Image: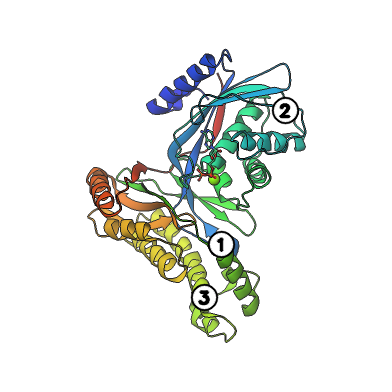
């Protein structure tokens, strides 16, 4: 592809990353690549319960300019980590060091080598508009963009799902984050105007349409992140797995929503487990219903499902926080908002709203002023529609 199919903003950032590349003394780029961030529309905390997730690629991107070297030296610069050139040898047996951002690239290089590719040295410059550490998966975007960029330098291709798994392994082994496959799959496999419906049991996926010039997604970053002392994530995941065992199923997906009350009556379930089971079973059902509703442009129904998801995450799963509850409640009450929920693991991060696009400007202003008045923090808000995934091309 060429830059002509990119949006004007995209083209401008591609030009900027080319300039950063040149200013860093790297010469002229050989390949450009872009990868989007992602947001999960619905299907929260069910990836480890055998459910489906429904992410979209968002209109925030990491851009890379790259050029092959004749030796094994890798040299990296990033506008988001200015003032320092990161270096390592592609030929080395690589290991992560501290929390340096080059770990993600080392992880991808290692994965490509293990997959049989001869990875040469290279120089690369990065500029990203994906908020770093904002729950929109700047890390997966970074892995994906380098995976695709290096493959394109080599004139090679790789199946998208295989590349996603390679990037997931990089995140596990080089960033120490034991994530599921959703982030990397979304960032690589998403298509424009579609949500990715990923089945976490067998990694099969489908594309579900959500394309409407009048409707979009509003991402509202609360800009807070609360650490939980009880290891909030592990407690809930282990609680779900223990409940599944008690109920005699492999995962909670096997529980028929129509027979939920029957399951909840099991005497061996603790009160916490009952709340986890109720969230997981109803959220799995809501995700499937949302695919249908969006496909039929039934935004009233899709919005109700988003609202119900938020209530379930707040009351049953208990992973929301006052800031996200405030945003969801405020947004849900506004004209032109079909629904709003927290998105991601919880305890902070972002909310997502299904909105009529003509209401975006007034809604954004309202949330900004009310949220800041309540919490003294400026939220970060932007609109998106489902974008295409990672791509690379010769300069
Ligand atoms: P998230 O994926 O939600 O944005 P993570 O903590 O998983 O948050 O990943 C953030 C890390 O990814 C940063 O600390 C940094 O190491 C790395 N990173 C992401 N984008 C960039 C970038 N443009 N330049 C340098 N490092 C980046
Ligand atoms: Mg991440």
Name the residue: 50% across, 22% down.
Answer: 2
- With 9 as the anchor, is 95 left or right in this view? right
Q: Earlier in the sequence, mark 1 or mark 2?
A: 2
- Crowd class of label 3 (few under 14; some 14 to 19; many from 20; radius 10 Å): some
Q: Nearer the viewer, mark 1 or mark 2?
A: 1
- With 361 as the anchor, is 34 left or right in this view? right
Q: Which residue is mark 2?
A: 90
**Residue 90 placement (x, y as % from top left):** 72, 28
Where on the picture, by quarter, is residue 326?
A: bottom left
- Secondary structure category for the residue under label 1: loop
- Crowd class of label 1 (few under 14; some 14 to 19; many from 20; radius 10 Å): few
- Crowd class of label 2 (few under 14; some 14 to 19; many from 20; radius 10 Å): many
Q: Which residue is mark 3?
A: 272
The quadrant of the rendering that contains the C terminus is top right
Real-space Cα separation, disc 1 to disc 2, in angstroms: 36 Å
- Secondary structure category for the residue under label 3: helix
Real-space Cα separation, disc 2 to disc 3, in angstroms: 48 Å
Establish if 132 lies above or below 198: above
Q: Which mark is residue 231?
A: 1
Q: Earlier in the sequence, mark 2 or mark 3?
A: 2
């Amino acid at each position: 592809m060429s830059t002509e199919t990119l949006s004007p903003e995209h083209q401008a950032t591609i030009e900027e990353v080319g300039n950063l590349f040149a200013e860093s003394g790297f010469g002229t780029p050989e390949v450009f690549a872009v990868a989007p961030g992602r947001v999960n529309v619905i299907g929260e905390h069910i990836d480890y319960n055998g459910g489906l997730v429904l992410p979209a690629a968002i209109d925030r991107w990491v851009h890379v300019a790259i050029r092959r070297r004749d030796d094994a030296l890798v040299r990296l610069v990033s506008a988001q980590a200015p003032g320092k050139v990161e270096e390592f040898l592609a030929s080395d047996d690589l290991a992560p060091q501290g929390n340096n951002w080059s770990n993600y690239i080392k992880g991808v290089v290692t994965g490509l080598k293990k997959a049989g590719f001869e990875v040469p040295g290279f120089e690369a410059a990065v500029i990203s508009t994906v908020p770093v550490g904002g729950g929109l998966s700047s890390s997966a975007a970074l892995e994906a963009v380098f995976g695709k960029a290096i493959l394109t330098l080599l004139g090679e291709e790789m199946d998208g799902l295989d590349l996603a798994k390679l990037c997931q392994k990089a995140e596990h082994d080089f960033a120490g984050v034991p994530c599921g496959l959703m982030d990397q799959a979304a960032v690589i496999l998403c298509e424009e105007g579609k949500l990715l419906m990923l089945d976490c049991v067998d990694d099969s996926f489908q594309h579900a349409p959500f394309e409407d010039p009048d409707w979009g997604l509003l991402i509202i970053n609360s800009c807070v992140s609360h650490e939980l002392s009880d290891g909030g994530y592990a407690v809930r995941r282990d609680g779900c797995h223990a409940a599944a065992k008690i109920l005699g199923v492999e995962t909670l997906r096997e529980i028929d929503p129509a027979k939920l009350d029957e399951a909840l009556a099991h005497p061996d379930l603790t009160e916490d487990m009952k709340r986890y089971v109720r969230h997981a079973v109803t959220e799995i059902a809501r995700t499937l219903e949302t695919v249908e509703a969006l496909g039929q442009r039934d935004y009233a129904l899709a919005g109700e499902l988003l609202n119900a998801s938020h209530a379930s995450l707040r009351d049953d799963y208990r992973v929301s926080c006052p800031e996200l509850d405030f945003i969801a409640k405020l947004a849900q009450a506004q004209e032109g908002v079909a629904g709003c929920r927290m998105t991601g693991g919880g305890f902070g991060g972002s909310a997502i709203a299904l909105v009529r696009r003509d209401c975006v400007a007034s809604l954004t202003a309202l949330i900004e002023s009310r949220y800041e008045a309540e919490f003294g923090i400026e939220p970060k808000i932007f609109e998106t529609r489902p974008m295409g995934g990672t791509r690379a091309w010769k300069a």
